[in-house]
Structure formats: C-alpha cells, structure tokens
Amino acid sequence: MNWKQIIYTAAITLFVTIASGIFVNWYTKNSIETNANREDLIYEIQNTSNFQTDSLKISLYAITLTNIGNEVSRDIKLQAIFNDNVTIIDANGKLERTKEVLRSLNKTKNTIEFRIPNLYAEDKFALNIVLDGIVQSPEVVVQSEKTIGKINIPKVTSNKKDNYDNDYVSILLTVILLIPILYILNKLFKKPKGYITNINNNAFLFLHNNQLEFSKELLEKEIKANGGSSHELANLALVKFMSNDNDTEYESLLSMAAFISNSKRGDFIINFNKLIISAKKKDYLAFRDLFLKCVVQEKKELKKYIDYSSLIVNLKKNDSKIQELLDELIKTFYSK
C-alpha cells in the first residue's frame, strides 16, 4: 500500500467514524421524540421557459419540494411524469441548504425519479428539468416514509426555536470538515485531463474549424436523440450566432445552458462562447470581462482553445482591435 492509499483510507475511515457517531446520537435522540413532531411536505411546479424553432422545441420546468413540518422527513421519493409526446433531455436536483447535487434514481423517456435520503425542517430540494417538446405541467408524486406530499399548500407558521439543534450543528461541521479532505483526495487521484470522444466534442472541433453546418447537424441530432447538457446547448448557440449575426435564437440557448449548468467546465464553455460572440459584435468591454472570467475558471484550457479555434483566428484578422486586445491579455496572463 503506497502513501496515497494510506491517506485515502485514513480520510475515509475518519469521516465514516465521525458520521456514524453523529448518526447514532441523532437517531437515539429523535427516536424518543413525542408525537407532537410531524413532517409536512409541499411542492410547487413552475414552467420557467420555453424555446421553439422550426427544428427544435425545448421547455424548462422547476419543481421545488419543501419540508414545512418540524420533523425530519426520510427516504423521500419524488417522481415527475410528463406527457408521452416529450423526451426528458436533462435534469439536476440540488438540496438548497447543503448545495448537494443528487442524481436521478430512475429515468425513462418522459419520467424521472429522485430519492432524497433526508429533508430537514424548512429544507428545500430544487429540481430543474429540460425537455424536448412544449408540454403542460407534469404529474408529480411525492412520498416519504410517513407522509404524502401536497401541492401548493401555504407555509405553516412554526413555533420551532430559531437556534440550531446541536445535532444539526454537528452535521454541518462534519460536512465542512469533509470539504478539505475531498479537495486533497481530488488532487492526489486526479487523472491528467483529456478529451473524451463523443458527439459534442466532435461538433466542437468542427465548429472551431468553421464547419458550422456540420457542427449544427451533429448537435441537433444529439439533443433530439439522447438529450443534451449545457455543453451542447452552449455550442449550438455559438453555431446559430456565427451562422447569422441577426439571429436571436442563440440568446435563448445560452440562457438555457446557464440554467442547467452545474459544473465549472459547463460555466467555462458558456463564457468562452460568449467571448467569441462579443468579439464578433465588436463589444470590446464585454470581451475583456469574459476573458477574465474564463481565466479564473479554466486558465490552461482557455489558452488551448484560443490557439486552436479558427473562429478566433479569423476574428483577429478582420479586427485589429481584437488582435491588440487579445495579445495584451495573453501577455498579461500567460507570459512567464
């Protein structure tokens, strides 16, 4: 066993020991609570945006689940069922208090299900869903170990004290202590960055070689066939813009990409594509601001993309101001 494995094993053991102790203490105290404690789950459904062209129809829905009771709700199932005529492209769920991202347990063409282990009093779970098609609100089923969720129930005023219970403080401290451990483990076991072969990456290569039509075809087929992430939507936005400067469809696509992006790389792709759009529009202030954002997010990748992209090469040839501004920024951030 090498030293990396030793550190990894020790960190996991420490976390499991602390978490187990807190769980046992928490379970023991809560198992003898009086019947006055109760859980009460409510949910709201909102259609946040629709986007429609001749070849593409996309709608966005947000479902917010809240525990307005004074008792923790356990093992919650949240299922959203849409019309058979649409396809779920992507979905992401996040616990509002801890910012923990949960993955779907089951997903079919028009149905998606999440399992939420625990939802404490006043906690919220936010689910964002992107669909291929324009549809009405889904049928939503919410059920925990003890109760069934209700829609649009007014929030009940609680007499619960504002101060945190010691158990919740302990859990929060455990999560905080886990952050540096995960950071260290990520640095130790992080693999060298590479580029996975997939349709989006191929479309990206064609896009930045100025083969816009083929890139557009690949991206739209991928979105319709298998669903698309923020990467596909952001790249399609750039294709739309570069194909026609007066086309406003790209703005909606960028908005959707930002809506479902839940990663640093996804945010970087969005800002990089905006960088090219600002250059094409001769918006030099926006170009500088977006360059700075990209440097903060993915400094090494930004330089690779700039050196590779024929779109940027053409923009520099046709606009001396962009050439000067880009040379200045690269000299500032990349000179030894």
Image (cartoon, rainbow, N blue to C red):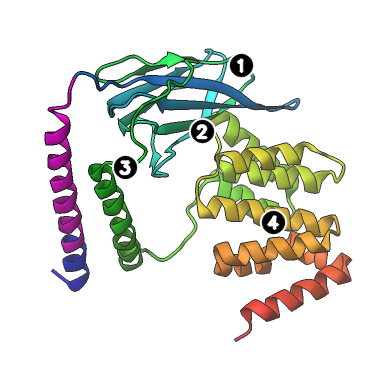
Dot 4: within a 10 Å radius of its alpha carbon, few (fewer than 14), some, or many (20 or more) residues?
Answer: many
> Where is residue 125, by image quadrant?
top left
Helix, strand or loop at label 3? It is loop
Choose between 93 and 186: the one closer to the eye.
93
Choose between 303 and 157: the one closer to the eye.
157
**Cα–Cα span, label 2 and label 3:** 35 Å
Q: Residue lying farthest bottom?
A: 336
**Cα–Cα span, label 1 and label 2:** 15 Å
Dot 3: within a 10 Å radius of its alpha carbon, few (fewer than 14), some, or many (20 or more) residues?
Answer: few
Q: Earlier in the sequence, mark 1 or mark 2?
A: 2
Circle on res. 164: 3
Q: Residue at x 57, y 14 (%)?
A: 85
Q: Residue at x 29, y 62 (%)?
A: 181
From the viewer's perspective, is residue 51 above or below residue 2? above
Q: Amino acid at mark 1?
A: Val
Helix, strand or loop at label 4? It is loop
Q: Which residues are magenta?
A: 10-34
Which residue position is annotated with label 1? 135
Q: Residue at x 17, y 58 (%)?
A: 14
Q: Residue at x 69, y 56 (%)?
A: 208
Q: Earlier in the sequence, mark 4 or mark 3?
A: 3
Viewed as shown, does residue 304 lie left or right of 120? right
Q: Amino acid at mark 3?
A: Tyr
The answer to whether residue 305 shows anywhere in this view is: no
**Cα–Cα span, label 4 and label 3:** 52 Å
Q: Earlier in the sequence, mark 1 or mark 4?
A: 1
Q: Earlier in the sequence, mark 1 or mark 3?
A: 1
**Cα–Cα span, label 1 and label 3:** 42 Å
Helix, strand or loop at label 1? It is loop
Circle on res. 208: 4
Which residue position is annotated with label 2? 90
